Image (tube, rainbow, N blue to C red):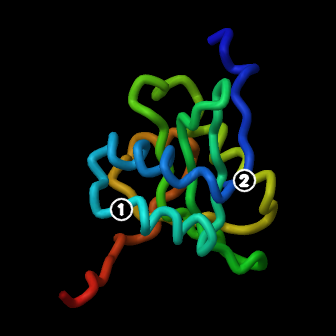
Amino acid sequence: GGNMSVVKIRVQEPSDGPALFRLYAQQGWDSFSQELLEQLLTASHWLILEQEGQIIGSARYLTDGLRTVYLCELLVKAEYRRQGYGSQLMAELRRRYPGLRIDLISDADAFYDSLQMRQRGMGYRSKPES
């Protein structure tokens, strides 16, 4: 659309915690408390998608900087989906880490298929013991 130009992608700031908490909560990801997200702001790498000062999406990832980028979560606010913003976040990740592979686990298969990413086996997760 015509609004693409006012969107910017930046790295995280310590003050992003409350807005990211709301963004995650809107997706129903209620295992992410505001306290946890504020800790993840310093423990992880983030790309923040911003439109006119509002956070409308984010990508949280881990990397060794040499071989692998592991994408933890990528999300775009519901009303901004299917407008290319998720693809922009992925493109920025590739731009920052050329030559590195990007790995992830997701059930949004159609989105990652559309980016010409290949499936590599199955995704597994070990849940922490309660």
Looking at the rendered structure, which numbered label has been put on residue 33? 1
Give the percent coordinates (x, y) of residue 53: 66, 30
Name the residue rendered at 52%, 57% in the picture: 118
Query: Observer-nearest residue: 47 or 95?
Result: 47
Marks 2 and 1, how far apart at CA: 21 Å
Q: Residue at x 81, y 60 (%)?
A: 98
Within-10-Å neighbours for mark 2: few <14, some 14–19, many 20+: few
> Most extreme residue toward the left, as rendered?
130
**Residue furthest to the bottom:** 129
Where in the figure is residue 41, as x and y percent of width and height?
59, 64
**Which residue is more in the foreground, 60 or 68?**
60
- The amino acid beneath tag 2 is Val
Earlier sequence position, callout 2 versus callout 1 = 2
Residue 16 image position (x, y, % from top left): 59, 50
* Amino acid at circle 1: Ser
Image coords of residue 78 (percent x, y): 39, 30
